[in-house]
Image (cartoon, grey):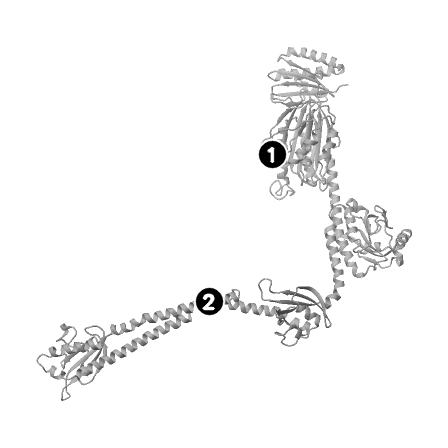
Amino acid sequence: MIVLLLGAAATVALVLQVRHDATDEARGRSVAVAESFANSPGIVQALHSPNPTKVLQPKAEAVRKKSGLDFVVVTTDKGIRLTHPKLNRIGKHYVGNIEPALRGHTTVDTGPGTLGEAMDAVAPIFDSNHKVVGAVGAGITIKKVSGLANRQLPLLVGAVSASLVLATGGTALVSRRLRRQTRGLDPIEMTRMYEHHDAVLHSVREGVLILGDDGRLVLANDEASRLLDLPPRPEGRLVDDLGLEPHVADVLASGRDVTDEVLVAGDRLLAINNRLTDRAGGPPGSVATLRDSTELRALSGRAEVAQKRLKLLYDASVEIGTTLDVSRTAEELAQVAVDRFADFVTVDLAEPVARGDEPLAVGGVEMCRSAVHGIRPNHPFYPVGRVFAFVPSSPQAFGLSGGEPVVEADLSEATGWQAQDPEQTAKVIEYGVRSLVTVPLRARGVLLGVVNFWRMKHREPFEQEEVSLAEELASHAAVCIDNARRYTREHTMAVTLQHSLLPRALPTQSALDVAFRYLPAESGVGGDWFDVIPLPGARVALVVGDVVGHGLHAAATMGRLRTAVHNFSTLDLPPDEILSHLDDLIARIDQDEGPGGPNGDGGGGGEGITGATCLYAIYDPVTRRCTMARAGHPPPALVRPDGSVEFLDLPAGPPLGLGGLPFETAEAELAQGSHLVLYTDGLIEDRRREIDTGLEMLRRALSHPGRTPDQICTEVLDALLPSNPSDDIALIAARTRVVGADRVAAWEVPSDPAAVSGVRAEVMRKLAEWGLDEAAFTAELVLSELITNAIRHATGPIRVQVLRDRALICEVSDTSSTSPHLRYAATMDEGGRGLFLVAQFAERWGTRYTADGKVIWAELATP
């Protein structure tokens, strides 16, 4: 930019100077030519000649051409041109001011002319009497003067451009070299970097020395000068000339890497580090750093102790409270403190704490020894499980009553502690135990117990400053123990509720041999349940379900669903309809107990039910058919008598609570002696095992013929039970039985009241054959009423079936979907008393609907 500005200024100055010089030259030349021509010999005679133009025109043109002017014009004293470069201008008045010339003065002026704007010099012509007889005008046009300057302008511009190119190239080369040397930093950044480096270098609490490859000191900061007592302005001097101690100078000038080498320099202890600077292409030399470690040596002992205590507290935060078991947490507290803080640790908890309860009182409460751990396996302390109470004079009693830790530096002189159990404390002292720190375990305002830290004679006794560490350990452990206590209480409540809601014994029935297993999760109570429900007609329903979630809410919801299944089963509905009713029930529970409450007013419990899965199966021992439906539950496994295993392909259906989709049933015919295995997902699925892997493992565990249901349950759990079950497991194994043809009799009945007597007679003969003569009268009465009602009120074929099981089951089926209802008949009514008699004589009676109609059944007691 500077060169550009200078070039432009020089060009303008040169152009102006050239124009000025050209103008002066044109003026001087015009005046000289005009005066010379006006004073030339013969010009006066030519003016007085008869034809002045003929004489003067050739001479004027010759002068003009030789002088380089644009015009030389001779005029009369009247201003009439006698000569002109353009002949048509001769004889006309002179354009310009010639008045001064006619008065005898030579003038130079610039103005318009016949040839354009011109510089005009006019000189007078004198005769011999010095009288003006005419004038000579000579001049040059302005454009010709400018042309003289313009012809030199390209040369000037070219020179300036060449200078600019050279300056730009030179600037680029210099800038490139400077940026390479300064690593791309501009001057402001370099200044800031230098200021920062200089400020850091001289303010750090660490000495810095930079040495060149020739062993001379390049730089030393203030801290290095102070630590080594360097002379003023030591830069540029050899290391050996700085007055350093020989071993320090040898390390600095050695040119080798040194890491934290401690050297004595005067009364200081210096830690020296030395590194070479030419490893990554840097300049040759080395950099040494110095630290004064004199004070660190004195503080290292205390720092090591503090570090060990911090490490102990960190380990305690990680190792204490890994489980929600009160006893295990107490053991972890004892283990983490032994050897690093104490030689022996004993933990005594209030006896109710182990059950999950809070101690009722602090003083006099019975304590239970929950943990003992030490550097030796044998110890002189109370064993784990011992129940005792602290005497008022013991330090533990003082700590519990005051809520503060107590230190006993010498147990041999602690009479209050010895009064606890003189015989036992004597053994402790004889064993070599020297001192004690007892700290109460307090969490959330509740005193849970006390932890005792013991040291042997070979170690220093506990000091008061160590009490804070003991308190930190006890405080963290107390919170963990209280968490475990609360969990134990809630878990016990949940397990108690869950066990009260599950079946305690299987009902008596003849269709299946059933065995079951129920295993709760190690942490938390789930909502798994199972049931075996006898149904009319010797049929049995098997139910397995799983409520999503854990805890009291899941267990309570499981109880509600189990009760609902029992209620729906009494209606003798098919499996798909029962699942539909359960789905509606869970939807209502969601609505009533969700965050918005039943009316969206926020009155709900806020727990929310995300759903449940269920499998419902009905087995009929007469037809050997099993009707099943499932709602998001794993499929059942069928183990045939030969040991082959098949997971029945049932329509999955959505989990309960989603709603919107129907459920489907599937039927399977089961051979006698087959095993139907129902289970929950906790058996086959785990955090470390995919469900497909679990199903394959279950298949292998079931593929062994000739086992009882109880053996199947045991071996399946042995093969598939996870080491730490995270979910409940419910398992049912049911072996099928078949009601033989010798225990079932059936007859088709025409729709004619006269046919009732014949059927009644056939039934009586069959009962006599079965040896049930005592039940014949009741059966005759019940069947007569049921058959008569079917003939009178139903349509289509009527079928009668009598089944001998644990009770005598009488069934009458027809194609009508209308169910009879029990009522009281009025005094004058002719009918309405039949079902009343049936209800009085039968143990149970009812109606179930089939795909073709309905079945009215009644169970009669047999001797």
Tell whether label 2 touches label 1 (CB within 8 Å). no
Find residue 244 and report its image quarter.
Answer: bottom right
- Disc nearer the start of the sequence (1/2): 2
CA–CA distance in space, label 1 to label 2: 79 Å
- Amino acid type at circle 1 is Pro
Residue 829 percent location from the top left of the image: 65, 18
Judging by the rendered image, the residue that carries numbered circle 1 is 654
Circle 2 — which element? helix
Q: Is residue 60 left or right of residue 482?
A: left
Amino acid on which the number 2 mark rests in the picture: Leu
From the image, tell me which residue sits under label 2. 173
| Residue found at the very far left of the displayed protein | 50
Q: Quadrant of residue 44?
A: bottom left
Which element type, helix, strand or loop, lies under badge 1?
Answer: loop
**In the image shown, does 608 or 650 lie closer to the viewer?**
650
Q: Residues within 10 Å of mark 2 (few under 14, many from 20)?
A: few
Say which of marks 1 and 2 sits in front. 2
